[in-house]
Amino acid sequence: QVHVMESGGGLVQPGGSLRLSCAASGTASVINAMGWYRQPPGKERELVAHITNTGTTNYADSVKGRFTISRDGAKNTGYLQMGSLKPEDTAVYYCSEGYTHNGRYYPLTNWGQGTQVTVSS
């Protein structure tokens, strides 16, 4: 069974940057990708970005050009580098490990507690 734990959130001014981390423990043969989701206040959780084990990345239109997803296989850790942050990026951010099929990402791990990102002046 695989577990994930997010960290790195905080309060940042508009235009600022943050780097989130996702530490994964355990392994599963079906897992070949990692994803980052976010849930803004009062809204549903949405997929922000995912990355496959071969390095292929995919981003939501709302974050393209501002966020970068990466992972360190040796450390079993993923990252979400967020730049040019906007107030609408305010949300609880969650990571997951999962798999991709036909380019679509499917989470497999249980949701962690997430990490709060607040963009405000």
Image: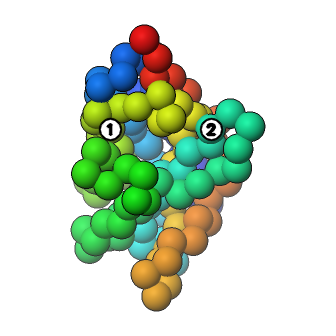
Question: CB atoms at circles 2 and 1 under 8 Å apart?
Answer: no
Q: Earlier in the sequence, mark 2 or mark 1?
A: 2
Q: Amino acid at mark 1?
A: Met
Q: Residue furthest top?
A: 121
On residue 3, the disc is none
On residue 82, the disc is 1
Q: Residue at (28%, 45%) from the top-left corner?
A: 66
Q: Eyeballing the image, is 29 above or below 112?
A: below
| Quadrant hosting residue 73 | bottom left
Q: Is residue 53 left or right of residue 86?
A: left
Q: Residue furthest right?
A: 42
Which residue, given by chain and number where applicable, does mark 2 sit on? Answer: 40
Q: Position of residue 57 (x, y in %)?
A: 31, 66
CA separation in Å, label 2 and label 1: 16 Å
Q: Is residue 101 left or right of residue 39?
A: left
Q: Eyeballing the image, is 15 above or below 11?
A: below
Q: Residue at (29%, 33%) from the top-left corner?
A: 84
Q: Residue at (41%, 31%) from the top-left corner?
A: 86
